[in-house]
Amino acid sequence: MPAGDYEPERIEEEWQETWVDEDVYAYDEDAAVDSNTVYSIDTPPPTVSGSLHMGHLYGHTLQDFAARYHRMAGDEVLFPFGYDDNGIASERLTEEELGIRHGDFSRREFQEKCREVCKGYEAEFTEKMQELGTSIDWNRTYKTIEPRVQEISQLSFLDLYEQGREYRKKAPAIWCPECETAISQVEMEDADRHTHFNDVRFDLTEPTSEGRDSFVIGTTRPELLPACVSVFVHPDDDENADLVGETAEVPIFGHEVPIIEDDRVDLEKGTGVVMCCTFGDQKDIEWYQAHDLPLRVAIDESGTMTDIAEAYEGLSTHDAREEIVEDLEDAGHLVDREPHEHTVQVHERCEVDVEFRVSRQWYIDILGHKEEYLEAGREMDWYPEKMFTRYEHWIEGLEWDWLISRQRDSGIPFPVWYCEECDHEVLADREQLPADPLADDPPVDACPECGHESFRPEEDVLDTWATSSLTPLINADWDPETLGDGELADGDLANPELYPFDVRPQGHDIISFWLFHTVVKCYEHTGEVPFDSVLINGFVLDENREKMSKSKGNVVAPSEVISEYPMDAVRYWAASSGVGDDFPYRDTDIVAGEKLIRKLWNASKLVDTLTADDATPPSERDGPAELDTLDEWLLAELDDLVADLTAHFEVHEYAKARNRLRTFFWNTFCDDYLEIAKERDSESTRYALALAHETFLKLWAPVMPHVTEELWHEFYVAGDVADVDAAATSIHVADWPEPRGFDADLAAGETAMEVISALRKYKTDEQLALNADLAHVEVFGDITGFEDAITGVMHVDELTVHESSPEITTEVADVDLDYSTLGPKYGGQVNEFDSAIADGDYEIADGELHVAGEVLAADEFEVREERTYAGSGEMVETENAVVVVH
RNA sequence: GGGCACGUGGUCUAGUUGGUCAUGACGCUUCCCUUACAAGGAAGAGGCCGACGGUUCGACUCCGUCCGUGCCCA
């Protein structure tokens, strides 16, 4: 039984080890035959190279609330864990850690090194995750680089190819010159740059009809001049209309380009005349395609100037820019140059400015299926609902098909070869998977198209999202019988009961790509929306509500927090905010959790001393035939609590659940009921105490799993922690409480609590100790059945209860109008009622109020009376009773 | 620049379809070592609900503008 102080450092660690060692949270496939009784969670796997941050802690804790609640509520829960280790992030990590470059090794060698480096990080990550005390099934983990996942990723590629949804195309794509790979729209982020705005004069080959022989263009990227292929003017731009149709000569480089009109020119900016280069930005690409312009590639894949740049060949874009500006100045073509702040798009992994390059890449067609994906989003339940708009707007704003090929070594290879002769695509047989074309042979000896016998392997690897978007299929172990039909058949999933997943938890920042890509992939492979619901967690901000960032130095590490506070207290804080809302990290909130743990521990000690020693949980044994009114009242209130909490947990309202439970436990149970119970000696009270206490342990279990587990074992499980079968006896596999149908006079109970509160106030006001004796107390009000409770806890010698009204004189102090009825009925006249009542200009007769020429019915107003007690003793009023103390 | 949110006592927050004394916690003040807990208990002070307009009999709640903050997307 609980004794002394609770020791979280020791006890939390003990339980964490036991839970993992004894597989308390293991998903039981054999038990889980029915998808209705399975609760499956599909967590986005964190990048292992990143260290654990407060976002991981918060996100996983939130999922754990759901997992633990559903496990107790009778569902077979799958709470898996994945490590994302096949992206550019882990590749760069390996390079840094070992001081090597990926290009110096064969793909398989480099992948070996990646896996070796990641292994260490994974072990560290696992350890840190387990310190969070979440109910993850550590038997169900996967790594995105492991062979089974590689196979699923390649299967996904084959399946979409069979469905005709993937294509290879030579087109402008977003390119990172640092990583030397194409990247997709979602891998870009904004960065502020300090640069210059250069006004450059272009000469015309012939003067215009207006007699002009030159014009000025503003640009931040003069190094793109060699790539200039045309100049544009807006059709509504009267000032520059004369330029249209003329030919301009590009300064320094001397090549001639046409001047064309196009309404995509921004009239608000610069001179209204802009150059189009291949390529400076996305608009250049649009123009290039719309006007069928030539391609002039001035920058190569590593960000170095090409021979097109003539004298500047071999320079970096940055150096070329400086030199070209100088030369423009010398040649008299630089009209003006001003410092300029602007936003550019950079690759999120290396923060290098992206370029746009024409290259041959693989794409998944998504632009043609926007409506289906919107519909898929509508079919999911969103917690909170408002987050759906993010998904909606993302899809509506899509401009590129999904580019899935990357020119990297690490990652999962495309299972494709090309005929050396006709470029015909040959895909791997599914039996070959996972395949690596650089090492493996194609499945055919000769090209099915032209009969040629030599093949070129695809060197590219799949985009990391191409794998990360398959986690539901990885968790359910996908291995489809047939490819290309886009439907789920019997046997396609080893664990079909898991799919669709009940919930997809994730941060609101990754709705647009991770969630979206996962919906796309899984929907296309199975014909079903992969998630029933989406649970969005907000960001953990610092104590000043600012985003944590390394540069600001305001990052709080979970390890620091956990070493200082019990994990249960940290979880209590994590339950403080509505899902989806960002919220600040504050020590004081965690301290509040610590206090609650202590309160629960101490209250448990008292319950233990007050109740009989019985190792059977009270919910599983018969109570006394007859319950005392007080005890029945508590249990009836408890029924309401259980119903409310169940409803809150069902819809992820953890903050509401937490606050409701805390208020009832602390105020009603500890402050009111326990104080009364101390003074009683009754079988009924002992049973109610024990049953309420057991219920509290269960209701707190999802939020505070460690302390509740410890208390549960102290009360109801015999033997040492090490000796018991934790998988069978844990509170976390016990049944979630249900209302038991206790029926009590809740009004009388409430009145009785008011009376007690009034007596406390009296004692405080009179500077008496709370356990001071009161000789005689009279109560005017209904407290039937609670008399003993009141006399006991308040130490009242004689209690008299009156049915009748007390000897008091009443005066009408004020009249409260029922505005919700009167407003719609009388409109503006309500103001007249108010001022008349304020002036005392009204009459009450036969229960009706005569005011401002109208007669208001009894239910349209309420009279507030001021009472003066005429008898002896001190009067204390409450909402439903009058108490007189002698 | 566009979109989505959010501004409530010193701090963090609750507030369901508008109904008139705005919730709780932390902190603060006073009192109480009452046989689980003084890291506790009892009582109390503290707010023109971001600003300005509008709709309404009535606005923290609805609408508009502005200011401030955050995220997403250009």
Image (tube, coloured by chain):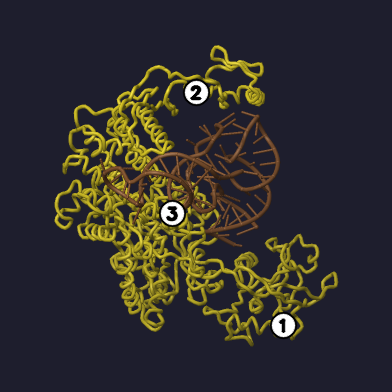
Chain colours: A yellow, B brown
- Position of residue A832 relative to residue A485, above or below, is above
Q: Residues within 10 Å of mark 3 (few under 14, many from 20)?
A: many
Checking the image for residue A868, the label placed there is 2
Q: What amino acid type is highlighted by mark number 3?
A: Asn
- Relative depth, front residue between A567 and A455: A567
Residue A563 in view: yes
Q: Which of these two is toward me, A204 or A273?
A: A273
Placement of A28 over or under A217, stated as above or below: above
Image side of residue A419 versus residue A814, left or right: left
Q: At numbered mark 1, what does the secondary structure look like: helix, strand or loop?
A: helix
Judge depth for marks 2 and 3 and give the one in front: 2
Label 1 vs label 2, nearer the camera? 2
User: Who comes first in sequence, dot 2 or dot 3?
Assistant: 3
How far apart are the two marked residues, 2 and 3, measured between alpha carbons? 56 Å
Chain for numbered disc 2: A
> On the image, numbered disc 3 is attached to which residue?
A537
Above/below status of A96 relative to A783: below
Q: CA distance from mark 1 to mark 3?
A: 53 Å
Q: Which residue is mark 1?
A: A328
